[in-house]
Amino acid sequence: MKIAVMGTGGVGGWFGAKLALAGEDVTFIARGVHGAAIREKGLKVFSPTGDMLVQPAKAVSDPAAIGPVDVVMFCVKLWDVDTAAEACKPLIGPDTAVICFQNGVDAEDRVAAVLGDRHAVGGVAAIAALIDEPGVIRHTGTMAWLKYGELDGRASPRLEAFDAACGKAGFETSVSPDITADIWRKFAFLAPLAGTTAATRMPIGPILADADTRRLFANLIAETVAVGRARGARLEDGIEDKQIAFAEGLPGEMKASMLGDLERGNRLELEWLTGAVVRLGRELGVPTPVSDTIYAALKLHAEGRV
């Protein structure tokens, strides 16, 4: 299967490496020193599930050098979605699936606006991984799975073929009949986690141990779920309690990547996480007072240090 990885960070790097080592035709799109290091030394992945080295690794900075592919694993940061979608145009054939593995809830719509509804596919990625240094991906923990589905819920040969390739590569995957609900289910945990850990500058353990910050986290979850339901996501009853229970099972030192970016002075995905809850809440008439406050508290840090 011919696969292009648009955005060779933690998600694209780890899953792309697994697919490449399983024999799939994978090309990594990576620019700058990261791309140069992959071309010169291969793509290295350090992981508790097993270290990997893809060498030689096919890596380019210009998608036009690849041509049409079967699948684009679309793994860029949320602020890069629109420009990255434009850059994907040379990768698109008649049946190319562009699977969006972003943290937000609007990447699929933004990709569809550029590339067409036919090509935009919903996805959910669960992994804690990042670029450790140019050409090197570091995976923490053992969680690593993908879920994907056509936005209209239909079964499709192209996703069945991709699912078979992922199964051959040896990681957990599934084709979802309701990927929109899955995307919102993840978002209703991740956006509150990002907002709470970034606003308090603390990991999840202390947040859950304190009654006030635990309530803050729970209120953010409740608001996000309410917005998702108002937008049509079929989220099950009791999901709010399930999200808290899931958080309690995480290592106490777990923190969202947005807090890590805040600590490093990097740009934040705030506009597409807490900001999206606020924006959609206003559009749909759903009150989001706690999200409004968290958004305002973090907004002046959103562009990183200048």
Image: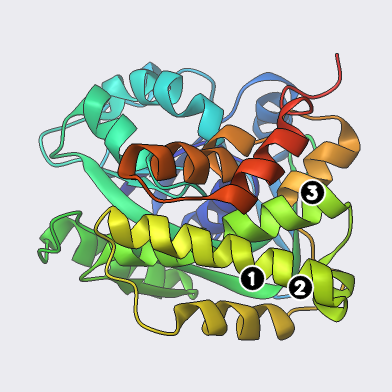
Position of residue 116 relative to residue 241, above or below, is above
Image coords of residue 3 (percent x, y): 36, 45
Q: Distance between the residues labelled 2 and 3?
A: 14 Å
Q: Distance between the residues labelled 1 and 2?
A: 6 Å
Q: Mark 2 points at which residue?
A: 214
The label number, if any, that marks residue 198 in the structure image? 3
Image coords of residue 111 (percent x, y): 31, 32
Task: Please give the name of the residue rendered at 63% of the width and 86% of the height, measured from the top-left corner.
Answer: 245
Q: Mark 1 points at which residue?
A: 218
Image coords of residue 13 (percent x, y): 60, 48
Q: Which amino acid does label 1 sit on?
A: Ala
Instruction: Say few, some or many: other residues with alpha carbon within 10 Å of mark 3 (under 14 / 14 to 19 / 20 or more).
Output: many
Any part of residue 4 in sight: no
Any part of residue 114 in sight: yes
Q: Quadrant of the C terminus?
A: top right
The quadrant where residue 81 appears: top left
Q: Seen in the image, is 160 located left or right of residue 262?
A: left
Whether residues under marks 1 and 2 lie with C-beta atoms below 8 angstroms apart, the answer is: yes
Q: Seen in the image, is 141 located left or right of residue 103?
A: right
Q: What residue type is labelled 2?
A: Arg
Q: What residue type is labelled 3?
A: Ala
Q: Earlier in the sequence, mark 1 or mark 3?
A: 3
